[in-house]
Amino acid sequence: MSFEQIVFYFFSAILLLSALAVITVRNPVHAALFLVLAFFTTAALWLLLEAEFLAITLVLVYVGAVMVLFLFVVMMLDINTSTLKERLGSYLPVGGLVAVLAIAVMAAAVGRDHFGLEQYAAPERLAADASNTRMIGEQLYTVYLYPFELAAVILLVAIIAAIALTLRTRPGSRYQNIDKQVKVKRDERLRVVKMDSEERK
Amino acid sequence: MNFEMPNFALAMPEMFVLGMACLILLVDLFLNERSRVVTYLLSQATLVGAFILTLSLYTPVRELTFSGTFVLDPMASVLKMAVYAVVFVMFLYTRSYLQARQMFTGEFYTLALFGVLGMMVMISAHSFLTLYLGLELLSLSMYAMVALQRDNRVASEAAMKYFLLGAMASAMLLYGMSMLYGVTGSLDLGEISRAIDEGEIERMLLVFGLVFMLVGVAFKLGAVPFHMWVPDVYHGAPTAVTQFISTAPKIAAFALLIRLLVDGLGGLQSEWHDILVLLAILSISVGNIIAIAQTNIKRMLAYSGIAHAGFLILGVLSGTAEGYAAGMFYVIVYAVMGLAGFGMVLLMSRAGFEADSLEDYKGLNQRNPWFALMVLFIMFSMAGVPPFIGFWAKLAVLQAVVASGLIWLAVLAVIFSVIGAFYYLRVIKLMYFDAPADEARIEPGRELAAVFSGNALVILAMGLFPGALMAICIQAFAL
Amino acid sequence: MFDAIENWMQGFGWLPDGLITFSVIMLKIVLLLAPLMTAVAYLTYAERKVIGMMQVRLGPNRVGLFGYRIWGLGQPLADAVKLMFKEIIVPSGANKGLFLFAPVLAMAPALAAWAVVPFGSEMVIADVNASLLYVLALTSIGVYGIIIAGWASNSKYPFISAMRAAAQIVSYEIAMGFALVGVILAAGSLNLGQIVAGQEGGILSWYWLPLLPLFVIYFISGVAETNRAPFDVAEGESEIVAGFHVEYSGMPFAVFFLAEYANMILISLLAALMFLGGWLSPFQGVPVLGDTFLGQDSILWLFAKTSIFLFLYLWFRATFPRYRYDQIMRLGWKVFIPITIVWLLVVALMVLAGWL
């Protein structure tokens, strides 16, 4: 086994185990942290594929920002896991059956016979000075320009939707208007009184 | 790297709608409550402008640009124009409803316009990537619109259900797409079609991807067995939003179906044919039968929509140009009827009263005979009674099915639509033969009354002269 | 130097190649970390001393070495020894595993980020293509240490602190990222070495001038990212005692401090690299001085420039009152992000016009 393979199996194993843990652990905070671990190991696997830009971006965006906010929310929730479990029993037979069927079909389709290295050769190594970032940039702004711009529009809609659904000004709430505070002139707040000194009595 | 400068002119309508939506977003910030009507007028102007642009770009040929991710063909032009028209009418309908419920805000209009943009992208997509992105753009706007009334518990619940199930369906669609990308090595629909025609790829893998994609599409269409969300969402959403999500997006979903199955996976026709037959039968039967048991008119219309989705699929599954044209005819007709159906609910409702129960329609004839007549038109058309347009739509689809040799399927569809006629006729019976439960006068604004009457009369007029629209649809698939 | 060591080890003949590479890398890491940790220790000393002077008092001046006072230079060593021998107390009801893991999570990214930081045109452990992005990614995950510490302590103040830190760091990361995008645009590279190389040619061609707004925003965001005054609402000793490390004692507590100061030095060093020309001499191209040793590129210039920023950190702390939480959010979202976006446009135009 080459060094690369050892690294691959090491990270794959952690990835699979942490992904499994995400859906099996009881504590939602632990689940979120396992998801972070899963993202991290995925980034490591992408590094193996010489996709360093994507790997670092995955860490930056998902681990550094998305999951932080996720944890933020999860920590504030008070989830009672026992009520969730009560209903599990009644769904288990049907759900389990569907899951087993789906896995069986997937195993038949997405197995080594069809997607093994014999059918799909491993990608060629890039030259040492090849820049993943540059290549992605060139593709994004030429061939994939239209989808790229669309993705941007989707994010814009997500922002609009999030703000429209959460921004509310409650009547009677009191807050400082910082713009007004900043614009205050000295003359509005301060009156300088000139008076002659008086003798002490 | 060989890169060809895209022909931006072909995407002018998309760019126009995007630019205007952003502009409206900004302009709305500086408007106060009284001048909010500017937002509304600008939105309508956007749709009119896009209509003119699309019309001027109409070509009888098929043009690809943006490295093959964007296609402009007659079908795309016609469907886009249908979307603009439907949304335009929807805006006309909903203005007074929104004003009465403090929902007359800039967000409603910008989100709707972004939804229109998503539909346009879907209709003009020639790659899995753009199809998916268009779909997400549309879905995201719709989820938000359903939840727009934040203090309404039913609406919030509907939005939540819609969002979760919709995300699930998107995931299925993506999984299927990734599978096909894996085996064909391309996201471009043309390339995929070529790779399949070469016949070197194992069929099983293709079908595996196909099934997952069909699950996603069936969900978006609201076809049985992926229909659970439809009644809850239609019922829970504010009626104005229901009117939006039940009409125009169906047109886009039809385009999605055609782009995926015909443009991309035409080589797998024998495989998707069987699946579509199953979806169609289930949708028509389940939709029509469950609709009978509904007492809420929005839920009834939701189940009727499910049954209509089944008919739409019937058109596509024949696999012929006539069949696709019939499907297209059906979906446009359905959008027009859907507008009128929910328009009727908007018409009857007033602030604090949603008029979404069947009881509310009792004795409508005594309260306002003109409106009762209009509702009669709509119900007859939906039930497929000649000479209304709904009849011609069903006829065209059934002809296509018979032509493809599936006579038993056509017979089954007819039987179920006869069963379905029951609940449409029940509304008419309530209107004409029952005593009114509510004596309050129906006082819709003049604009709303005019739009509603116009819409119902259009249903009659199109029924008397169905040839023009049918010719357009046939021409769209004449390539 | 490292080539010589490598050759020397290969001279033995029986050592496997992998081991040789590994030991050379380890050596480099040790050579980086040992001075870094010393710098961290003496930064705490400098902080107390500088703030002391600013407040007209002496600061630490008792602990000396070998019986000599020498202005209290032994203080950091004494502090370290004290913290090492203190008991590690785990509060009851705390999540023990995560409680002890949190300091590690704070420390690891703070140190790992140094792997790609160059100290000279050849002096860098890993010369990565996307090194700037790597640094940004690693500094962004340092917040996990704080969040987990706050949550695992099972205590109110730490929890409030964790929530504050999470929101604050995510907010300022955006402004910081945009500021860095400006640098990337100007330099045309994500590699820190090449970014410094792009500033060649004297004090006026360093990026601080064309990117002035980004420079200021970067450093202020850096202060916010490291949770230092006046953005230290996560610690806020006057309102939530000490924030996320209220419940920590002994070495875990010290590790949080090490991470914070290592991050401060990192931010300062990066500011020097990206905006003040790194190891380039300010006298480059100046007629007389530029020909002397002062005109040479040197690691000492880098350290001098870094010290300026470190001093600013301390100066801020002595000068400014703490921001209120909503003011922090406003500054980040409504002031910094718009400015950076506008200036990005300006930078892009400057690059197009060929001025950069």
Image: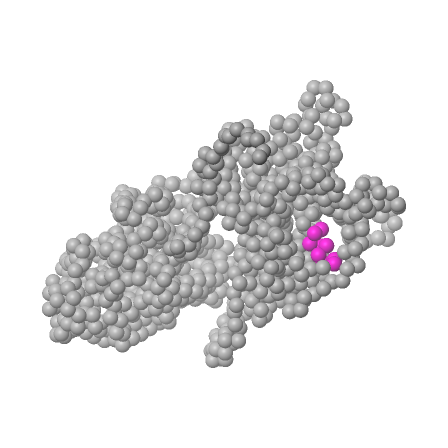
> Does residue B241 appear to the left or right of C294 in the view shown?
left
Q: Position of residue B151 (x, y in %)?
A: 36, 62
Q: What residue appears at the point 70 percent right and 47 percent down from the top-left corner?
A: C262
Q: Residue at x 33, y 63 (%)?
A: B237
**Rendered position, C115 above or below B413:** above
Asked if residue B359 lies left or right of residue A188, the reply is left
Q: Give the main secondary structure of the magenta stretch.
A: helix
Residue C293 covered by magenta stretch: no
Q: Position of residue B344 (x, y in %)?
A: 21, 63
Q: Nearer the viewer, residue C206 or C101?
A: C101
At 53% across and 73% down in the image, what residue appears? A81
Is residue B143 at all visible to an observer of this figure? yes
Q: On the picture, is C230 further left or further right than B388?
A: right
Q: Position of residue A12 (x, y in %)?
A: 63, 62
Instruction: Please tell me which residue is depicted at 29% across the width and 53% down the height of the picture.
Output: B104
- Quarter of the image where one finds residue B351: bottom left
Q: Nearer the viewer, residue A201 or A74?
A: A201
The foreground one among B181 and C197 is: C197
Residue C285, by quadrant, is top right
How far across and down, in percent of the image, does residue B324 sit? 29, 60
Evaluate whether residue A39 shows in this view: no
Magenta residues (range)? C250-258
**Residue C257 located within the stretch drawn in magenta:** yes
